[in-house]
């Protein structure tokens, strides 16, 4: 079977935007969008099989385990779910993945990362939110650090970022912190998206639910 063609989009349920439109509004080429459609179909039919990506399918793709609870996965899913309806459709999938494209502007990556840490959606990152996300990222990476080490990481990061000392990090402070600490965004670029038409990430090829 070849790559998805533009015609396949109009025959699909639910109906998808024209790939040329998505390409013009994201960092992907038309061929890249069509390749992402093939990837999307594999994910969206891995468990529920309704052409939409549900949270358990998203977790299956990330962890090869649809039952593993993780704040990081939940938060990324929530940010991909732009319509806030509990599922990710193809347009949301492409637009959100575009942020992780190596050619996406640094401002897009910075804003997405800020939202990732702003767990309560207040427009600020509180210290407890930072702690929760650090613990989630460590869990996602299967790293185990002592409580004192985690607190040191959180304290140092927060003291650097909260430049006005008001006990919370606003978007401007976050932007300045990222400029001084570019490694903060190291996970915000996925190299395989540079040429998605050539290969899919390895985890996708194993994202099938077990019987």
Image (cartoon, rainbow, N blue to C red):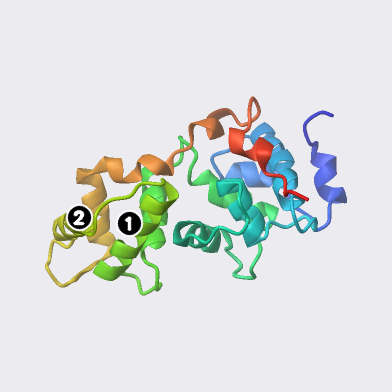
- Circle 1: element type: helix
- Give the Cα separation between the discs numbered 2 and 1: 10 Å
Q: Is residue 66 above or below residue 169?
A: above
Q: Residue at x 60, y 33 (%)?
A: 202
- Disc 2 versus disc 1: nearer the observer: 1
Q: Which quadrant of the figure has residue 104?
A: top left
Q: Earlier in the sequence, mark 2 or mark 1?
A: 1
Return the residue found at the far top: 198
Q: Residue at x 39, y 73 (%)?
A: 120
The answer to whether one can see residue 126 in this image is no
Q: Residue at x 42, y 55 (%)?
A: 112
Q: Is residue 180 above or below residue 129?
A: above
- Circle 2: element type: helix
Residue that mark 2 sits on: 157
Indicate left or right for 93 with 46 as reference.
Answer: left
Q: Position of residue 148 (x, y in %)?
A: 18, 58
Q: Are marks 2 and 1 in contact (CB under 8 Å)?
A: yes
Q: Position of residue 83 (x, y in %)?
A: 61, 67
Q: Residue at x 61, y 51 (%)?
A: 65
Label count reads: 2
Q: Is residue 209 above or below residue 82?
A: above
Residue that mark 1 sits on: 134
Question: How many C-alpha atoms fall within 10 Å of the one at disc 1: few (<14), some, or many (≥20)?
Answer: some
Q: Position of residue 40 (x, y in %)?
A: 70, 46
Q: Is residue 4 above or below residue 93?
A: above
């Amino acid at each position: 079977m070849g790559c998805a063609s533009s015609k396949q989009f109009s025959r699909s349920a639910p109906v998808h935007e024209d790939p040329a439109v998505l390409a013009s509004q994201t960092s992907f080429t038309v061929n890249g969008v069509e390749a992402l459609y093939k990837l999307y179909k594999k994910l969206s039919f891995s468990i529920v099989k309704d052409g939409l990506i549900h949270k358990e399918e998203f977790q299956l793709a990330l962890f090869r385990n649809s039952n593993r609870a993780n704040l990081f996965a939940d938060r990324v899913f929530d940010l991909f779910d732009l319509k806030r309806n509990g599922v990710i459709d193809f347009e949301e999938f492409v637009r959100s993945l575009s942020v992780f494209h190596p050619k996406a502007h640094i401002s897009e990556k910075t804003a997405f990362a800020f939202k990732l840490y702003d767990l309560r959606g207040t427009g600020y990152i509180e210290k407890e939110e930072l702690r929760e996300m650090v613990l989630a990222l460590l869990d996602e990476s299967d790293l185990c650090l002592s409580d004192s080490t985690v607190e040191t990481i959180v304290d140092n990061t927060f003291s650097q970022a909260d430049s006005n000392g008001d006990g919370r990090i606003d978007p401007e402070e976050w932007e300045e912190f990222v400029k001084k600490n570019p490694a903060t965004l190291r996970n915000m670029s996925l190299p395989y998206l540079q040429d998605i038409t050539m290969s899919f990430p390895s985890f996708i090829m194993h994202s099938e639910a077990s019987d």
